[in-house]
Image (cartoon, rainbow, N blue to C red):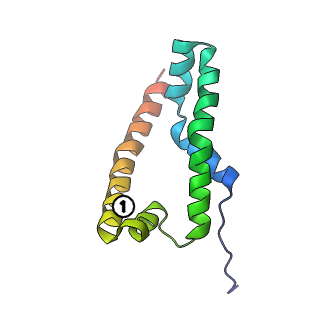
């Protein structure tokens, strides 16, 4: 009962989490409607250029600095306390606007 388990996030989990964060329903509906079949190529290029490097970056930082705090902790270590606090605030401001936007979007889509 007193044992602690080490939390680990794998590269695959990080890449899938990033895809779920960036790939939302409006981008799935909007890009194919506008670009057609070419949108598949766009998403493959986007995966190579963004998702895989982003996953590698987060996996490396997460395994090198396993303490709690994520991006805020990493920025504090790299750039100091002031930048770490700013990143923390920007992250929460982003979440504060993003979550209601997602809820409103889903409410709108589900109303049809």
Q: Nearer the viewer, residue 100 or 34?
A: 34
Residue at 58% of width from left, 64% of height from top?
62
User: Which quadrant of the structure image shows residue 16?
Assistant: top right
Tag 1 secondary structure: helix
Is disc 1 surrounded by few (<14), some (14 to 19) or many (20+) residues within 10 Å?
some
Q: Nearer the viewer, residue 33 or 58?
A: 58
From the viewer's perspective, tell me whether residue 10 is left or right of residue 89. right
Residue at 47% of width from left, 32% of height from top?
106
Mark 1 sits on what residue?
A: 88
Q: Residue furthest bottom?
A: 2
Q: Position of residue 28 (x, y in %)?
A: 56, 25
Q: Position of residue 38 (x, y in %)?
A: 61, 16
Residue at 65% of width from left, 69% of height from top?
7
Q: Position of residue 63 (x, y in %)?
A: 62, 66
Question: Quarter holding the N terminus?
Answer: bottom right
From the viewer's perspective, tell me whether residue 94 is left or right of residue 111. left
Residue at 43% of width from left, 27% of height from top?
108
Q: Position of residue 26 (x, y in %)?
A: 49, 26
Tell me: residue 103, above or below residue 64: above
Does residue 35 appear anywhere in the picture? yes
Does residue 19 appear anywhere in the picture? no
Q: How many marks?
A: 1
From the viewer's perspective, tell me whether residue 106 is left or right of residue 64. left
């Amino acid at each position: 009962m007193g044992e602690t388990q080490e939390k680990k996030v794998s590269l695959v989990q990080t890449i899938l989490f990033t895809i779920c964060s960036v790939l939302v329903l409006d981008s799935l509906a909007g890009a194919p409607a506008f670009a057609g079949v070419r949108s598949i190529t766009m998403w493959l290029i986007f995966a190579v250029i963004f998702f895989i490097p982003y996953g590698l970056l987060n996996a490396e930082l997460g395994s090198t600095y396993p303490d709690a705090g994520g991006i805020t902790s990493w920025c504090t270590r790299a750039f100091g306390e002031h930048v770490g606090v700013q990143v923390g605030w920007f992250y929460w401001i982003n979440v504060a606007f993003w979550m209601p936007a997602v809820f409103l979007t889903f409410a709108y889509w589900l109303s049809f």
